[in-house]
Image (tube, rainbow, N blue to C red):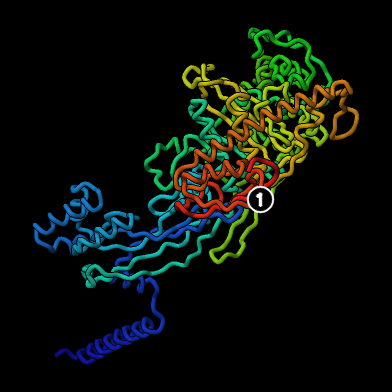
Amino acid sequence: MSRFSPVRMKLVRLGLTGAFVLVAARSAQLAWAPDPRLARLGERQYSSPVELAPKRGRIYDRRGNVLAQSVEVESLYAEPKLFQKMTREQRRAGVVRLAKALGLPERQIAERLDSSRGFVWLARRVEPAVARAVAALDLDGIGSVKESKRFYPNVELAGHVLGFSGVDSDGLEGLEKEYDGVLRSHAKKFERPRDARGRGYLPGDGFFVAAEDDGQELILTMDQQIQYLAEAALRKGVLNSKARGGFVIVQDPRTGEILAMAGQPTYNPNAFGKHRPDEWRNRAVTDVFEPGSTIKPLVIAAALEQGAIRPNDIFFCENGSLDVADVTIRDSKREGWGWLDVTKILGVSSNIGMIKIGRLLGKDAYYDSLYAFGFGKKSGIDLPGEAVGLIPARKRWSSVTLASASFGHNLGVTGLQLTSAISAIANGGTLMKPYTVRRLMGPGGQVIHDVAPVEVRQAVSAATAAKVTAMMEKVVSEEGTGIAAAIPDYRVAGKTGTAQKVDPISGGYSDERIASFVGFVPASKPRLTILVVIDEPKTSVYGGVVAAPIFREIAEGSLRYLTVPPDGAGRSIATTGTVADDTVGEGSLATRVLPSQTAALDAKLAAVKKLAASRAATASAKIAEDAPDGTVPDFAGLSIRGALRVAEPRRLELDVKGTGRALRQEPAAGMKLEPGAKVTVWFEGRGDA
């Protein structure tokens, strides 16, 4: 033995002692202050977490009606290693039975069950009957867990605005996409215990790790009843005109709130996969089109604001034909018009008259006014996919550009931009930011954020807006192009539009048209701005023929529903006289009506009122009769006898309150209701019993 052996032994003993001390210290540290990272590694070794789709917060309309909610449904999974322990014959029979119960190809089921993974999904968010059928098979390694599924109780209603969420509960379209981070809660996990080799030691069993239900809820500016009126009228209008499609926007001009937004063709967000992606598109926000004559009130407003014209100025309209550079522009009326004042130019929609007004305004002032009214840029609405529109660059404006833009060609706008611009005329000249969500709520009902109206800018003065409003009322009088939009007892301000569509291949104009009508009501104190756009109508290309009646149906039903008082049966300065000058006072226009004209005017107004009332009664009955089976019809405007006639075949019990015409009802139109259920309808005014 070496003389150094004792030293070496001491070193070995010292090393062993030190190692023991370190191990003991580390053990104590892990016991009293465990490392979270190591704890996670241990948990991962002995459990197999599967993340489930998180629950989403509800979406309500402005009156608290549920438009979107999450419900618990069964999702089916398999543990292939357990399934593979059965005999070959048992596995083959199990695949056949599973495929039949799920309605899936046998090959697809077999591939999933042959997997080497410990967990696979078979089908997620299945119908209750399917889940029961699979459970009845009692197959080893086949189980189910409850997941959250998005459900839209009103089916297609407001589908383009609401959008939908995918299989992992992520928002994919509409408000579901825009507010995805707000609506989603934290995901819930399904834990599957297993041994160190990854084998489940509780076959077919597991437990949930619940997540905090922190998904927020949305209260919209939209109104379910007005949305139903808009969709029903648009659907009928598109069908009657044999059009390719169309859309409607209803806005509160005082605040910018969107009350309704409907599109055709539509889709069912509960089954969005069965529809083409182009049917998901919210055309009111994403599509760009030439506004045509609906831009004319805004051109006149800009010219008045700049002092380029006065309401009583008279222009020679060249008998319907005018050469601009090397282009000949014509009015829609074959023989054209001669001398017309500004109000008449708007009323009959003379392109030649508008060109002359546009020339006095000038390209720079017109260009600036377009941006003042919100064109050429996004409005900032809380919906995805908003288009910017297309305004030619200032330096590219030629004499032809100015001429065509004066009557709405060579410009690209969205329906949302046009609606908000006309709302600025309605509310006294202020451009408001459009929005669809008015409140964010916590899962416990607490208010997290209230959305307030936002004034973007003063586009024109209140005096100018009042003058243009009076002119727009003339459009809906017996002399204008929008008479089909007239509503008994209410003053309506509006403008018709017809524009050619651009051929995307040639870059020129095609033979197809877009027909439109935009207006607001009551003209004295506007509550509703409504835009109706019909894409490629076949029966007529004129907005006054195919779009104005849709406006009337929506406006009339909404005014009754909102109990907005009449403002004078159309008897206003815009329908009783001719503008004399613009110096009589801010916000008003002078009139000249001779006593001898009163009787003739009253007779004309009575005839218009009688015709509009007849059309409205017929339209109300048709809307009610066209309500889908299993839903509450819209009784608005019907007499008691007419309401009973509609309710009887649907086996609905009608609780009649009052007499006259139906003013409101409970439940609201479009709601799901079983036969034999009771519907209370309040009637007011005069009408047959």
Image position of 329 with respect to 79: above or below: above
Residue that protrudes farthest toward the front in the picture: 689
Image position of 33 with respect to 590: above or below: below
Residue depicted at x 60% and y 27%:
516
Residue that protrudes farthest toward the right in the picture: 584
* Element carrying mark 1: strand
Residue depicted at x 65% and y 25%:
496
The amino acid sitting under disc 1 is: Gly
Image position of 157 with respect to 534: above or below: below
Residue depicted at x 36% and y 71%:
40
- Quadrant containing the C terminus in the rendered view: top right
Tell whether 642 sits left or right of 133.
right
- Quadrant containing the N terminus in the rendered view: bottom left
Q: Position of residue 251 (x, y in %)?
A: 65, 41
Considering depth in this image, is 132 or 386 the residue closer to the camera?
A: 132
Q: Is residue 22 visible?
A: yes
Considering depth in this image, is 176 or 495 the residue closer to the camera?
A: 495
Q: Position of residue 525 (x, y in %)?
A: 76, 41
Q: Is residue 366 visible?
A: no
Residue that badge 1 annotates: 658
Q: Residues within 10 Å of mark 1 (few under 14, many from 20)?
A: some
Q: Position of residue 403 (x, y in %)?
A: 68, 17
Q: How many marks?
A: 1
Tell whether 637 sits left or right of 126.
right
Q: Position of residue 613 (x, y in %)?
A: 66, 33
Residue depicted at x 24% and y 87%:
12
